Each structure stands twice: as structure tokens, then as C-alpha cells.
């Protein structure tokens, strides 16, 4: 093979290899961040590609920027690598935003102190502008916006996000996924398969939850079951000792955990009734399912939960005794009779106690 022929061979070989490589497009993600420590490491994780890390960067003077290249648009989550670097929403595991990674410049402004900011997405590109418009709209207007976006070839990849909103309606989720083009279905075949499997699992879990709720025994009118667990000072506290205390007329039994959003949202209400009725004979005995004792203790202290707080692992007998399938669960016990007066998820405690503790 002479020199010219050899050169032609290598050019052909390199051209063939290049043709096999996917075309990559430039993508810039930049923005501002509030509620996150300066110097914190931020990471982009690709939901549609087995949660692989795409890129990392660092917060500098309240700003950040990622530079990357992508072959196809994808859905990503922005995290702080160390959740302790987030001043607000610590118990979201460092999650800050979710949005779409696609060619162009994407603007992501993070307000970690605002619990609703996490779901507002980003702006600057077609998918992100459509998603942001939907999430910022009045809930009654969102259905029409979803339909508009999924029907537009520039933004119909939103069908993959929309389908995830139907965990209890597999038919509707599948119909939404089927609105993708054949090329899109082929490109995202692996993620679509994973999504469908997750939807089936979630639908089965929802069915089990509904069945458990239907079969749940209501303990109203029955006598409380005693328990003893350690409090934040690592001292065992027996429920019967609290109920037998002559200063107490009623005890709220509260099953919760720091990772349970409805539980966390109910804490201000518990603080209000405790401040209002404690001197009149109310005590609260909160049982947490948290697995990390130190984080639970810190949460109780930082949130001013000044009543009795104990920790019971998820396999503890108390959950079977009280039929706890889901949290929050709240019981109200009459200390004089030992009778359970209330057994609900989120009762209006102030209204109930106002009639009992004059």
C-alpha cells in the first residue's frame, strides 16, 4: 500500500468513526442561588439516564454555571452534594430544582428558602419555558397548558414528565407516553421502559395503601396501649406515666417523621395547641420513625418542639399495636379514663380541644 493509498485509508477510517459518534450540542446552565452556602458543590443528575452525574460546579458569590454537551435533551435534577450546605429545606436531601437539559442557555434561579421554588423549573429554552409556564400557572389552567405543550413537536417530550403524574391511572399514563413520535420512543426507549415499570409498581402500592386504609381498625373508644421509648436526652419515657400524671387531662399521641412532609407541615399546628392548652392539662407524646437519631434530635430542637419526643424504629411493636400503616397519625387520649377519643390523620385539634379544655 503506497503513501497516498494509506493516507486515504486512514481518512476513510476516521470519517467512519466520526459518523458513528452522536452529534453533541453545547449547553450552558447558569443562574443565582439563595439559601445555599458559598463554595458548595452543585451536581446535575440525569433522571432519564439512570441518574448518572452529568456535571459538577461550585457556588461562587451566589452564582453558578455548568458547561456541558448533550446528544439529546434530558430531564435533570440539581442537587447540593452536601445537604448541610443548604440553609433551608435541609430534609430534601440537597435537592434544589428539576428542569430540562437541552441545547442553548438555561437560566436557573434557586431560592432554597421557598419550599415552592423547587418545582418551578427553569427558563431560556423551549422545554424549560413550557414547563415553567405550566408550573407557574393557576392549577385550574395547567391541564390545557400540558395538552398544548405535548401537542407541540418542540415540547412534546414533556409527555414523559406528564405520564409520571398518573401513578394510579396506567391507561392514561400509557396514552400520554404513546403521543411521542416513533423516533422519540426509540431514543428514550430505556427510560420509557423504566418509567412504565415504576408506574406499575406505584399503582400496585397505591392499591395496597387504599386496601390498608379500608381495613384499618379505628381505635376510637378503645383503651390506649402502653409504650416506652427514649426521648431526645436518651431517657426512657413511659406513656402510662404521662397519662397518670395528675397535671395532664389529655395526651396527644403523634406518629410522625422528619422526612414526612405532611407531618412536618402539621408541626406549627401542634406548637399552637401546645402553647394554648398545655397549662390547661394538655401534653403531647410524639413518636418519630426517623432512622438517624442525631438528625431527629437536631430537628426537634431547631423547631422548638418542647413537648415529649421519643424515637421508635419502624419495626417497633408500637406501630402494630396502633395499626400504623402511614403517617401522620394522631390519637387523643383521655387521661382520666385511658380512652382514645380521636384517631385520625390530621384532625382539627384546636377545635376538639377548645370543647374539652375550657
Image (cartoon, rainbow, N blue to C red):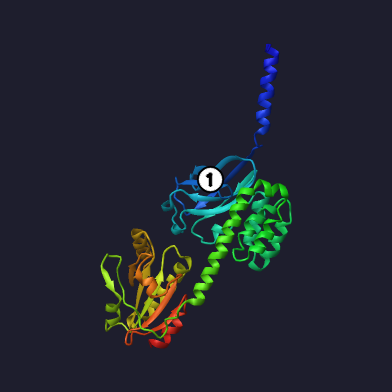
Quadrant for the N terminus in the image: top right
Q: Residue at x 54, y 57 (%)?
A: 118
User: Picture coordinates of residue 274 (x, y %)?
Assistant: 37, 77
Query: What secondary structure is marked by label 1?
Result: strand
Compared to residue 48, the image places residue 259 above or below, namely: below
Q: How crowded is mark 1: few (under 14 residues within 10 Å), some or many (20 or more)?
A: few
In this view of the protein, can residue 209 be seen by the observer?
yes
User: Picture coordinates of residue 196 (x, y %)?
Assistant: 61, 56
In this view of the protein, can residue 122 be seen by the observer?
no
Q: Does 145 sit left or right of 283 as displayed?
A: right
Nearest the eye: 55 or 289:
289
Residue at the extreme top of the image, as rendered = 2
Q: Quadrant of residue 164?
A: bottom right
Nearest the eye: 335 or 35:
335
Q: Which residue is drawn at 66% across and 33% down?
A: 20
User: Picture coordinates of residue 142 (x, y %)?
Assistant: 66, 64
Q: Does 32 sit left or right of 232 as displayed?
A: right
Compared to residue 236, the image places residue 68 above or below, namely: above
Q: How many labels does the image show?
A: 1
Compared to residue 294, the image places residue 271 above or below, namely: below
Quadrant for the C terminus in the image: bottom left
Q: Quadrant of residue 133?
A: bottom right
Q: Name the residue under label 1.
A: 52
Q: Does 282 sit left or right of 4 as displayed?
A: left
Nearest the eye: 31 or 338:
338
Q: Residue at x 31, y 82 (%)?
A: 248
User: Picture coordinates of residue 127 (x, y %)?
Assistant: 66, 51
Amino acid at each position: 500500500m503506497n503513501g497516498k493509498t494509506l493516507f486515504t485509508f486512514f481518512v476513510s477510517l476516521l470519517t467512519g468513526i466520526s459518523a458513528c459518534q452522536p452529534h453533541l450540542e453545547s449547553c450552558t446552565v447558569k443562574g443565582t442561588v439563595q439559601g445555599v452556602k458559598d463554595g458548595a458543590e452543585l451536581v446535575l443528575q440525569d433522571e432519564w439516564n439512570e441518574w448518572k452525574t452529568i456535571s459538577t460546579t461550585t457556588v461562587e458569590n451566589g452564582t453558578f454555571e455548568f458547561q456541558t454537551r448533550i446528544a439529546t435533551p434530558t430531564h435533570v435534577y440539581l442537587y447540593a452534594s452536601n445537604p448541610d450546605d443548604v440553609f433551608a429545606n435541609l430534609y430534601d436531601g440537597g435537592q434544589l430544582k428539576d428542569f430540562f437539559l437541552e441545547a442553548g442557555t438555561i437560566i436557573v434561579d434557586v431560592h432554597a428558602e421557598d419550599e415552592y421554588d423547587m418545582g418551578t423549573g427553569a427558563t431560556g429554552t423551549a422545554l424549560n419555558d413550557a414547563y415553567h409556564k405550566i408550573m407557574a400557572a393557576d392549577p385550574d389552567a395547567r391541564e390545557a397548558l400540558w395538552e398544548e405543550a405535548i401537542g407541540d413537536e418542540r415540547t412534546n417530550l414533556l409527555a414523559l414528565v406528564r405520564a409520571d403524574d398518573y401513578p394510579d391511572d396506567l391507561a392514561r399514563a400509557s396514552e400520554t407516553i404513546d403521543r411521542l413520535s416513533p423516533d422519540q420512543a426509540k431514543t428514550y426507549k430505556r427510560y420509557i421502559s423504566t418509567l412504565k415499570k415504576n408506574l406499575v409498581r406505584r399503582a400496585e402500592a397505591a392499591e395496597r395503601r387504599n386496601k390498608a386504609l379500608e381495613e384499618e381498625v379505628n381505635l376510637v373508644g378503645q383503651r390506649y396501649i402502653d409504650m416506652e421509648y427514649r426521648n431526645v436526652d436518651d431517657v426512657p419515657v413511659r406513656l402510662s406515666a404521662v397519662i397518670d400524671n395528675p397535671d395532664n387531662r389529655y395526651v396527644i399521641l403523634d406518629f410522625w417523621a422528619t422526612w414526612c412532609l405532611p407531618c412536618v407541615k402539621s408541626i406549627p399546628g401542634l406548637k399552637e395547641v401546645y402553647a394554648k392548652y398545655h397549662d390547661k392539662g394538655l401534653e403531647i407524646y410524639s413518636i418519630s420513625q426517623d432512622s438517624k437519631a442525631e438528625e431527629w434530635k437536631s430537628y426537634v430542637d431547631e423547631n422548638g418542639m418542647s413537648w415529649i419526643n421519643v424515637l421508635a424504629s419502624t419495626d417497633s411493636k408500637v406501630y402494630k399495636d396502633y395499626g400504623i400503616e402511614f403517617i401522620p397519625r394522631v390519637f387523643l387520649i383521655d387521661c382520666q379514663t385511658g380512652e382514645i377519643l380521636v384517631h385520625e390523620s390530621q384532625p382539627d385539634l384546636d377545635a376538639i380541644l377548645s370543647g374539652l379544655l375550657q
